Amino acid sequence: MNFIVRIQKSSRELLLFATAALALGIAFSMMDSTFNNFLNENFALTGFQRSFLEFPREMPGFLVVFVSAALWFLCSRRLGVVAMLLSAVGAFLIGFASSSYGVMIIWLFIYSVGNHLFMPIATTIGMELAREGQDGRRLGQLNAIRNFATIVGSFIVFLGFKFFGFTFQHTYALAAVLMVVGAALLFSMTPEPVTEKRGFLQLHKEYRLYYVLNILSGARKQLFITFAPWVLVNVLKQPTQIMATLFTIGGVIGILFQPLLGWAIDKLGERFVLASEAVVLVFVCFGYGFAKFIFPVDTAFLVVCACFLLDQMIFSVGMARATYMKKISKQPDHIQPALTAAVTIDHIFSILAALAGGVIWNVFGFQYVFLFGVGLAVLNFFTALQVRIPKKEDQTIAG
């Protein structure tokens, strides 16, 4: 009953954005839980070829600051519409027009441009819709909605492939439709005023620690996006249904975990949350890399699944970096450009990490990719300890 009352008291803008987040979360879940199997079944890639695919997939993340600068005249909500329409086109073409590996890469690039363009926009809008001092809570609530959407999307994939003869074409067509629905909901939101010069191509030395945190995040995230699922699919030979099931379980856990994480950010601070993430990641990387050599096959599979779920949860710690940026920003119109620049910085190192990881996988073995991840986690821990939030009076004096 309390939940219903809170919905009734929510603003029109928040309800529209939350509904869009639900539709888009289902769509992205359907794409994420099937894409590795789609690649494996249609193109039979080696470990290096799979890692090289991250170059066209992650390159749009590098380009997003330039695309945003070119579209500076669009407010964040209208830019979100453009982003989701691009993703919808890309998803549909991946399913229906991937006649070869090279052609599929083109469609993947289009899908990824929209996806990466939307990342900082979603965070910006989420914080715009938050009460004072509750940015973490609001982002946590929205992430909980996305986690629920992950459950729905993964469950659709599981039922579809298990009982109803789904193909990848069915999956990607439905995902594209949901992205168009999300774009329509974003278009229905009231557009906010646009600052004439938002400085998308400008970096500020005052935010250098924030940029460093995103460099480490960019390299780290490839372990989750590329190599962690590839351990399950390629090393442990798990089918599509298993990946969908893991995303479903992770979504269930996330419904409770995301608001708790948002509360922790608001109450315990960004430094504590970011440092804790780094510690957990050390154990996760050891599990990914060495479970197969330490445990029997069935136990190793369960350990890797547990690591995958932990990784899926701590991946959301990125919202702590966003709230940190908001708290240290010298003026409000620095926030979205800084978040967008961070996506570009993140992806420069994400691409490099994917290529390096592919070489390491092929030359030394997959376990050494995750030893590399342990090193990144240690660096991340000591960087997180440098995080300081200025007091409000200090920001006032600085302003």
Image: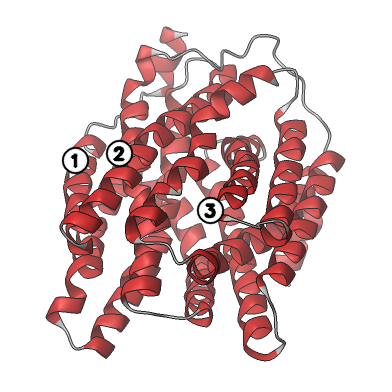
Q: Which numbered mark, 2 or 3, is in the foreground of this view?
A: 2
Question: Percent x, y for residue 324?
Answer: 42, 33
**Number of the label disc, if any, that sits on residue 188:** none
Tell me the residue that label 1 is attached to.
Answer: 379
Residue 12 visible in the shown view: yes
Q: Is residue 323 left or right of residue 8?
A: left
Question: Percent x, y for residue 59?
Answer: 49, 36
Tell me the residue that label 2 is attached to.
Answer: 216
Amino acid under disc 2: Leu
Which residue is at a point 54% across and 41% down the rendered structure image?
A: 135
Does the CB distance between marks 1 and 2 fall below 8 Å?
yes
Which residue is at a point 55% across and 22% down the rendered structure image?
A: 337
**Number of the label disc, if any, that sits on residue 140:** 3
Dot 3: what SS?
Answer: helix
Question: Is the residue 168 above or below the residue 216 in the image?
Answer: below
Amino acid under disc 3: Gly
Amino acid under disc 1: Leu
Question: Is the residue 255 above or below the residue 142 in the image?
Answer: below
Instruction: Looking at the picture, tell me which residue is in the foreground, 14 or 225.
Output: 225
Considering only order in the chain, which callout, 3 or 1, is on the residue closer to the N terminus?
Answer: 3
Does the CB distance between marks 1 and 3 fall below 8 Å?
no
Considering only order in the chain, which callout, 2 or 1, is on the residue closer to the N terminus?
Answer: 2
Question: Percent x, y for residue 136?
Answer: 50, 45
Query: Marks 1 and 3, how far apart in space?
Result: 26 Å
Query: Marks 1 and 2, how far apart in space?
Result: 8 Å
Dot 2: what SS?
Answer: helix
